[in-house]
Image: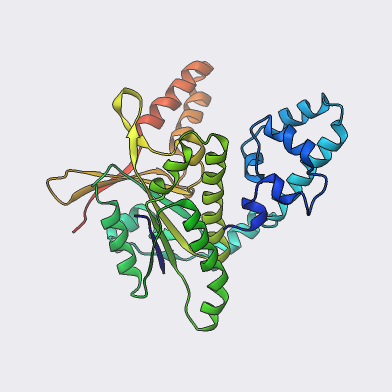
Amino acid sequence: MCCVDTGKESVKEMAPLKALEAEYPILDPNFQAFCASHGIFSVEDFLIHDLYELAAFAEQQPTSEKLKQGITQVLSIIDTQHQPWLNGMELLDDALHNKHVLSTGCEGIDLLLGGGLREGQLTELVGPSSCGKTQAGKRIFQRIMNGIVCHSVFDIFTMFNVLHRLVINFPSQLQKGGQVRMLIVDSISSLITPILGNSGSQGRALMISAGYMLKKLAHEHNVAVLVTNHTVGGERGIPKPALGQTWKSIPHVRLLLSGDHGNNVRSISVLRHPSMVNLSTFIVIAVHKLFKPDLRTALLLLLVFQITRRFSLTVEIS
């Protein structure tokens, strides 16, 4: 297991558009200037931009054909970085045969998560400062194995380099009979928050790239990835996970850890899990079919169920 403690992806994924001009002449200064006028400076920026809107603006330019060819070229670059598309049966077969479950060492948490942390998934542990996130992470990886490698990194670019080296070393580790089973990043928010500030779309693009790289590593190498995140003040002072809406969709599983600073009792809740049926939606649909309420009432019922429903338990972390 490799633990990344925070106290490159491929060149094409991380490079600005200008760096790709030599290999792709269609991405000339005119195309770069057009993209820059819309806040697009790198390949990652395309992932968070409305491409239909961009194509519509390109249509209005004198060199519209070349601009559209450039957009197509960037999309092709993005496409080459992704795995081939898989259908549902192929994904299920891969999950059953290659993606095992790693016990957390806590019977209650394992029961809550259907066995523990699943390989191939990115799990996020969210909680306020000093709530026990690091302690919980240490307990998990000490339970799993003794072969622990720690790297201290203090910015997102160093983390990219560590992950890149990890991927390069995977084949040699397998030949030696070893295998990385779990990767812990504690904490992902301390690496990403500094780049969000005033950097605008570039900061968000780096955040998306970090999430994508962790998920890709988890899926392709059957690794359980656990990251920790802090909380910030939300509406009416209610704490919410940091890093905003863009990051919210990245983790497969999101867990909320909270507790009393005066003792070792912690409460853990499942905010999101791909294997858990959305019971609230099912109930609202059933109510709608049986009693035929209007759409507004049905949506209100759904909102109430979403707010009140939560899979949770209380555990003691010693």
Q: Residue at x 22, y 48 (%)?
A: 266
Residue at the limit of the structure toward the front, as seen here: 29
Q: Quadrant of the C terminus?
A: bottom left
Of residue 249 and residue 76, the one placed in the foreground of this image is 76
Of residue 186 and residue 97, the one placed in the foreground of this image is 186
Q: Residue at x 47, y 79 (%)?
A: 178
Up the image or down, 29 lies above or below 21; here it is above
Q: Position of residue 109 (x, y in %)?
A: 31, 55
Left or right for 73, reference 258:
right
Q: Position of residue 179 (x, y in %)?
A: 48, 74
Residue at the limit of the structure toward the left, as seen here: 262
Up the image or down, 243 lies above or below 57; here it is below
Residue 1, by quadrant, is bottom left
Left or right for 267, reference 198:
left
Protein image colouring: rainbow
Number of numbered callouts drawn = 0
Q: Position of residue 72 (x, y in %)?
A: 79, 42
Q: Residue at x 54, y 73 (%)?
A: 169
Q: Residue at x 16, y 45 (%)?
A: 261
Residue 140, by quadrant, is bottom left
Left or right for 50, reference 156:
right
Residue at the limit of the structure toward the bottom, as seen here: 176
Residue 56, by quadrant, is top right
Q: Position of residue 34 (x, y in %)?
A: 74, 32
Of residue 218 and residue 104, the one placed in the foreground of this image is 218
User: Does any portion of residue 81 appear in the rendered image?
Assistant: yes
User: Does any portion of residue 82 appear in the rendered image?
Assistant: no
Up the image or down, 309 lies above or below 180; here it is above
Up the image or down, 24 lies above or below 299; here it is below
